[in-house]
């Protein structure tokens, strides 16, 4: 769909962005083409979702013309450095993916630089097929934006999103007041939290006594779980990588107080993990945020929680595969049930890769070079 300079939609986008530039025009053309292909219109709420793969000026064209914005939670940014835009409708995920291919018709000056004025004319007038490769897609969309309760900071009285509160000397305070708090008090409290978190290095994972082989503490488990979570999030479109890693890091914090309860223990022992997690987080200035992470992990409803859950299971799966390769005849049975617990396609794919890989392959395949030629 070509654009005219007098088009009120373009004028509005320029007012929103601040100036007319090639990037803004790319975003505007992508937005209009996507809406046309989907037979839709500008989003009033969160019914339409835009996924952008760069943070250039084109993002403002997408925001203005589609109504998909950061504030509404229906604009997803992937830092992939590509002029690629996906629009999709809830709830079925029906969408269109638009790849900008207009660089091949970009006018250049004698010195090789882009002729910006001529390029803007091209972006206004060129047919859609010369600017974009369009593909119909089915998109797995995240849930609607989560709305957290607002609580009053007990220092300044201002309202703040509950998970962003900090706890200092029993008072829940906002991030701004935390920065003004008495440093020795905050640091003393943090020191208590760090000593408690260190208990995870001394807390054994108890399932190995039933496997008959292996030993690991909770901190060791949490480390590789976080690594796996980082990778799974990177391989999953729309996942918040930082959220997944944080969920993995803290998911077993309560075990600093309860110890690790394996599947046999849980038949007889009831550990109050919710209370233990709350009490363990109480000394951290960011305690309410940690409590929110623990609750999200327990509920396993968000994409990030499902990925963190799978990372937790995959750490065990990797460990069991090592034990199986070393001859533990019970590991195969454990692996069968652990695989069934996985909840995401990325987790299942990674599990299959782990199961078909010898645990020494990453280095042992070079044994001739390492052991004979020493290079």
Image (cartoon, rainbow, N blue to C red):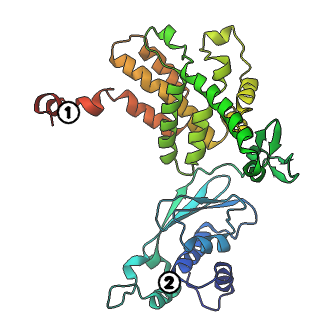
Q: Nearer the viewer, residue 199 or 359?
A: 199
User: Residue 126's spot in the image, x, y percent?
Assistant: 48, 84
Which element carries disc 1, helix, strand or loop? Answer: loop
Q: How many marks?
A: 2
Kindly identify which residue carries mark 1: 366
User: Residue 194's spot in the image, x, y percent?
Assistant: 62, 31
Whether residue 36 is visible, yes or no, is no
Report the residue at 49% width, 13% height from top: 208
Which element carries disc 2, helix, strand or loop? Answer: helix
Report the residue at 48% width, 32% height from top: 224
- Label 2 crowding class (10 Å Cα cut-off): few <14, some 14-19, many 20+? many
User: Residue 207's spot in the image, x, y percent?
Assistant: 53, 14
Q: Earlier in the sequence, mark 2 or mark 1?
A: 2
Report the residue at 74% width, 50% height from top: 175
Which residue is the extreme one toward the front? 184
Which quadrant is home to the N terminus?
bottom right
Q: Nearer the viewer, residue 248 or 144?
A: 248
Which quadrant is home to the C terminus?
top left
Whether residue 231 is visible, yes or no, is yes
Q: Nearer the viewer, residue 21 or 94?
A: 21
Q: Is residue 246 above or below residue 15?
A: above
Q: Is residue 71 above or below residue 153?
A: below
- In space, the residues marked 2 and 1 are separated at their CA atoms by 53 Å
Q: For the residues labelled 2 and 1, say whether their Cβ atoms are less than 8 Å apart.
A: no
Residue depth check, mark 2 versus mark 1: number of the one nearer the observer: 1
Query: What mark, if any, has residue 123 been given in the picture?
Result: 2
User: Residue 269 occupies which quadrant of the picture?
Assistant: top right
């Amino acid at each position: 769909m070509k654009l005219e300079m007098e088009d009120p939609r373009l004028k509005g986008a320029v007012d929103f962005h601040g100036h007319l530039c090639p990037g803004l025009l790319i975003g505007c053309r992508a937005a209009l083409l996507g809406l046309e292909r989907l037979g839709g219109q500008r989003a009033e709420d969160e019914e339409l979702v835009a996924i952008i793969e760069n943070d250039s000026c084109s993002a403002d064209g997408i925001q203005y013309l589609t109504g998909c914005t950061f504030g509404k939670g229906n604009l997803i940014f992937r830092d992939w450095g590509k002029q690629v835009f996906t629009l999709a409708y809830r709830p079925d995920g029906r969408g269109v993916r638009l790849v900008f291919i207009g660089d091949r018709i970009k006018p250049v000056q004698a010195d090789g630089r882009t002729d910006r004025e001529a390029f803007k004319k091209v972006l206004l007038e060129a047919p859609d097929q010369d600017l974009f490769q369009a593909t119909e897609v089915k998109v797995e969309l995240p849930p609607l934006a989560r709305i957290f309760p607002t609580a009053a900071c007990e220092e300044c009285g201002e309202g703040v999103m509950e998970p962003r509160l900090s706890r200092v000397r029993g008072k829940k305070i906002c991030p701004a007041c935390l920065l003004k708090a008495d440093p020795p008090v905050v640091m003393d409290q943090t020191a208590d939290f760090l000593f408690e978190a260190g208990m995870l290095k001394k807390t054994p994972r108890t399932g190995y006594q039933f496997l008959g082989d292996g030993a690991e503490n909770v901190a060791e488990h949490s480390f590789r779980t976080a690594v796996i979570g980082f990778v799974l999030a990177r391989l999953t479109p729309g996942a918040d990588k930082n959220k997944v890693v944080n969920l993995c890091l803290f998911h077993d914090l309560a075990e600093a107080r309860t110890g690790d309860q394996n599947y046999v223990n849980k038949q007889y022992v009831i550990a109050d993990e919710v209370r233990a997690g709350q009490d363990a987080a109480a000394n951290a200035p960011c305690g309410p945020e940690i409590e929110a992470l623990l609750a999200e992990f327990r509920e396993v409803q968000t994409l990030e929680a499902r990925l963190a859950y799978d990372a937790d299971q995959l750490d065990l799966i990797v460990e069991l595969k090592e034990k199986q390769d070393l001859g533990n005849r019970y590991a195969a049975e454990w692996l069968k049930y652990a695989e069934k617990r996985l909840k995401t396609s990325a987790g299942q794919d990674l599990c299959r890769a782990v199961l078909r890989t010898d645990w020494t392959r990453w280095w042992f395949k070079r044994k001739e070079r390492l052991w004979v030629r020493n290079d």
